[in-house]
Image (spheres, rainbow, N blue to C red):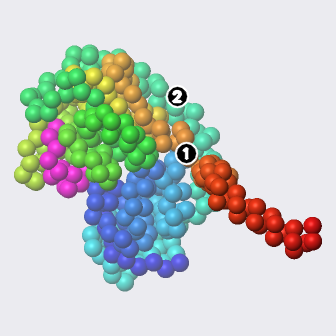
């Protein structure tokens, strides 16, 4: 196998996909490649993916590598962190077998993944998964005891121009099936016109569906410049100690933003914000709430998320995966029945018409004469 293209290099996959162009080679550093990151890569149509880390460690099952292989994208895996310094952004690189070349010399070597290797790693991951879940639950309970007061005491929210009081709020998170779930609930959005609140990259998903977010909450590391400039009110998620790394990006773009300190994830902050500001109902799509969701984000527990959902649960509706609940399949038999149902009334009216009856009598007479009846 021989693949050549321009390299895009970044240790954060969600940053890299914002620059990646079709036909280029993505050089990432993403241990246990999750399906959301893989789908982001697929949308950019790279020629190949080179991963400094193992795309499947065997700790827990993740389907990201399988998605890339099924799409016909080669994955050179576990080449080591040195690739990030050996290959610069925009370099012309060539992948020959299990070796990556840049400027005419070999710069990295790894394993070229195939379906058989991935399935073996997934089998090992499935066997190890109960142990991972046990550790995850233990961490969640321990940290929940430490974080309970900070979640329950409420947020210090500066004045916002967006009014949440008494409104239904749709919170969009860039998670599995977020795009499909948004499309599945279009009738709800059309009829109820909820306030649209996006968490980071969820803003781009809303825009892709033809909706403009009114508020964007997050650390602003996985949302595009286009989404940030769409006119939404920006709320930067700060750590409890006040550090707000996302503020530098909004300032660099010349955009005004409010800063709110909160423990946990930006998704947790979005729910707490909507609840505290008086939302009558919170509908969530693309949420992260399973063990796999959190492990794929590098988190070893979900204490704050558990506490937040306990706090806002009375007004929360989670629509994650609703697009999978029922999928309409085309069946030829249904089409035949619909056509028959539509034609039957017309046929009855036609048969009852005097002209039709005269024509039928004439046809019958001709048949009798022809056959001597």
The region drawn magenta spans 223-236
Disc 1: which residue = 327
Question: Crowdedness of circle 2 by 10 Å Cα count: few (<14), some, many (20+)?
Answer: few
| 235 magenta-colored | yes
70, above or below 238, in the image:
below
Disc 2: which residue = 134
Q: Position of residue 255 (x, y in %)?
A: 9, 48
Asked whether the viewer can see residue 299, the reply is no
Q: Residue at x 11, y 41 (%)?
A: 257
Q: Position of residue 166 (x, y in %)?
A: 22, 23
Q: Residue at x 31, y 66 (%)?
A: 20
Give me the C-alpha separation between circle 1 and circle 2. 34 Å
Q: Horizontal placement of 226 versus 326: left or right?
A: left
Q: Position of residue 231 (x, y in %)?
A: 14, 47
Q: Nearer the viewer, residue 249 or 254?
A: 254
Residue 272, quarter of the rendered image? top left
Question: Crowdedness of circle 1 by 10 Å Cα count: few (<14), some, many (20+)?
Answer: few
Mark found first going from the N terminus, 1 or 2: 2
């Amino acid at each position: 196998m021989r693949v050549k293209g321009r390299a895009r290099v970044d240790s954060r996959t969600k940053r890299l996909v914002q620059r990646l162009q079709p036909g280029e080679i993505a050089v990432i550093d993403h241990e246990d490649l999750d399906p959301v990151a893989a789908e982001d890569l697929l949308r950019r149509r790279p020629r190949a993916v080179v991963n400094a880390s193992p795309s499947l460690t065997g700790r827990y099952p993740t389907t990201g590598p399988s998605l890339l292989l099924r799409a016909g994208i080669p994955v050179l895996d576990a080449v080591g962190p040195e690739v990030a310094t050996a290959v610069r952004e925009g370099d012309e690189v060539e992948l020959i077998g299990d070796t990556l070349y840049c400027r005419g010399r070999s710069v990295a070597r790894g394993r070229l993944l195939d379906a058989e290797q991935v399935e073996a790693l997934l089998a090992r991951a499935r066997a190890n998964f109960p142990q991972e879940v046990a550790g995850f639950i233990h961490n969640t309970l321990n940290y929940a005891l430490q974080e309970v007061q900070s979640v329950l005491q409420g947020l210090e929210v500066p004045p916002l121009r967006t009014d949440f009081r008494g409104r239904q709020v749709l919170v969009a998170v860039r998670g599995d099936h977020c795009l499909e779930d948004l499309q599945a609930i279009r009738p709800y959005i059309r009829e109820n016109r909820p306030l649209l609140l996006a968490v980071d990259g969820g803003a781009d998903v809303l825009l892709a569906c033809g909706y403009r977010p009114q508020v964007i909450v997050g650390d602003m590391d996985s949302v595009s410049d286009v989404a940030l400039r769409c006119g939404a009110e920006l709320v930067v998620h700060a750590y409890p100690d006040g550090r707000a790394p996302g503020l530098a990006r909004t300032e660099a773009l010349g955009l005004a933003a409010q800063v709110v300190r909160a423990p946990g994830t930006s998704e947790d902050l979005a729910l707490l914000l909507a609840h505290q500001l008086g939302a009558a109902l919170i509908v969530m799509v693309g949420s992260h709430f399973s063990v796999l969701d959190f492990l794929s984000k590098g988190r070893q527990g979900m204490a704050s998320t558990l506490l937040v959902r306990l706090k806002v649960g009375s007004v929360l509706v989670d629509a994650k995966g609703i697009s999978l609940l029922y999928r309409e399949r085309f069946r030829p038999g249904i089409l035949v029945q619909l056509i028959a149902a539509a034609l039957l009334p017309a046929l009855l009216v036609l048969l009852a018409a005097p002209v039709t009856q005269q024509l039928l009598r004439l046809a019958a007479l001709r048949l009798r004469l022809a056959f001597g009846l």
